[in-house]
Amino acid sequence: MMLRRMLNPSSVAIISGPSRGSRATPTLRLAFALLLCLLLGACATMSGPVAESSADSDHAEQLYSQGNFDQSAAAFLELAQTHGGDEAAHYRLRAAEALRERGDLDGAARALAGVKHRRLNGDEPLRLDLLDAEVALKHGDAAKAQTLLAVDDDDLPANLRPRVLELRARADLASGDAFASARTRASLDRYISGADREQNRKQILDTLATIDTNALKTRIDALPATDTLRPWVEQALRGKGQPLARAMSRPSHPVGTLQTAADGTLEAQGYKTLKHVALLLPLNAQLASVSQSIRDGFLSAYFADKVERRPEIRIYDSGKTPADAVAAYNAAVVDGADHVVGPLQRESVGDLFHQSLTARVLALNHPDTGEVPPPGSAEFGLLPDSEGAQVAEHMRERGITRAAVIGADADWAERAARAFRAQFEAAGGTVVGTTRLRDKEVNYATSIVQATASLGAGADVGVFITMRPQQARLLLPQLKIAHVDAPVFATSHVYAGDSNASPDRDLDGVEFCDAPWLFGPIPGLPDHNQVARQIASANGVGARLFAFGMDAYALLPYMDWLLTHPESYVNGATGELTADSFGRIHRLAGWARFQNGIALPIDGALSTAPMQQ
């Protein structure tokens, strides 16, 4: 059957727009209920009360749960006056917790006067310490708060863990240790959601922003690779214009290796059967062609898979705004999706990551704010930053120690150039000059001098470019005229995606990283040349997006395995795909070189490459 006919089967449902009606209501109600429980913290369901239930105590608890904290506190204090011993201590603690929720910490302290740990049961002594620590922080006694919060994490009840961590972070900051405060908040991030998580993430970055750049670089060097604070320090440094060199990924074990199961049958290592998958893409006119290439690649991989392994697929329009994307996600969950692929826009990815996710997500971009996905989910994108860093590693492996950088005057080119510089210099190289080429500029003589005047000659020099083919075809002849004979290396942007021998002869000798599927067969995937003849969206610049869509499908059944086995990889259309413990997919791209105007793969095209951030 021809591939173009296979892309519109009756078994694949396309939802024309995100659900905005009653479908989302149960999800929203559930999210509100979960948030309310988190905000209440020490609610009536906490363990350990010794007081017997009575109409009066039930009424006080009901007032608390309804948010009538003044009345609840008064009712608890009245109960404390009519009871003695352990019961009185219990009621005073509950009164203090009600006053805390009202915002009256001094009133809470008065309610707790004389309450002793020995009179409390279950988790009540810890709740007493938390209130005392919060009162101490209000009055500027960070040292007392830190002493009260010095609890073994293994002993923390799950319902109190977020509050303990939040108070520790405040105590650390009050004591002058901003780095420790940010690190504690990074640990807190996994235990909260919604508005609480969004506020906590803002506080992480605000706290790190107060730390000197050099101090941040020194501190991150001492952090383990899996430390939850690392992505936030990386993000903070990027915000200061100081991106870090990427960590090196050295995958050695392909996923899916056949092995004998307990019942004697063969099974693919790391494979997890999928049931219901939703694909979220913006189908509006502005991004229609991009979405079409990704969708067609995703479905091509789907139909190339074994029939018995294919899940149910539904495609949803993720709209134009982050709110549209969240609504599409909620609709997919209501329809039974257990895995969601997408959304595509960076802003939408960020907003979705702030939600309480019930279906796992493989986002098709990295959020513009730079935070990592919630536990169990992942993010995957074709980042210019990653390519810039990979080119730097490739040049250093070639023995190049001095480089000139020439890029387009665009945000993506600037990101690639910054990442290149960070990686190249971290590996001992020197960037001798940089320049940017304006869109309508055709005479690059001045820019070439600016970038290469100090380059010199020899086997240890090279030029890094990040620009579209049109600019590169103008630049390369002018480099020769300027007697710059150093080898030239580029990001994938230099290749239009199709053979165009006549104009691309000007690019002869340029080496660039790109999706290996464009240049040769990949085991288990449809052949690019065959697909390109049948499906228009697999041609030109759409070819990389088509490959990206195929890889999104290939990653899904191995997400769990990859997140816990960093040495494993998926042999994908865009490169070898690995993951780190933070849920970030890393791509080891292939290498190609222009010869007689044709882009051809270099022997051993897949080589060690740096991880994405």
Image (cartoon, rainbow, N blue to C red):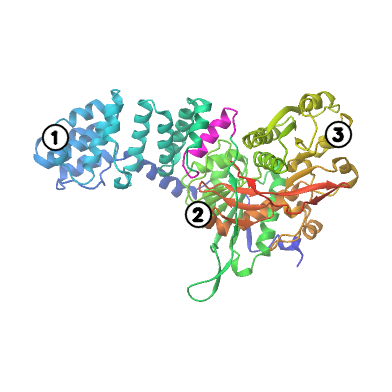
Which mark, residue 78? Answer: 1
Looking at the picture, does residue 191 appear above or below residue 4?
above
x and y percentages locating residue 455 in the rendered image: 77, 29
The residue shown at (68%, 31%) is: 430
Q: Mark 2 = which residue?
A: 564
Which residue is rendered at x = 30% and y = 25% of the image? 138
Q: CA distance from mark 1 to mark 2?
A: 54 Å
- From where the camera sits, is residue 569 visible? yes
| Residue 214 x, y percent position in the rendering | 53, 27
Tag nearer the camera, 1 or 3 = 3
Quick check: 378 left or right of 135?
Answer: right
Q: Is residue 116 magenta?
A: no
Element type at marker 2? helix
Asked if the residue at tag 2 contacts the one at tag 3, i.e. Cβ–Cβ closer than 8 Å, the answer is no
Residue, disc 3: 474
Chain-order first, disc 3 or disc 2:
3
Say above or below: 577 vs 265. Answer: above
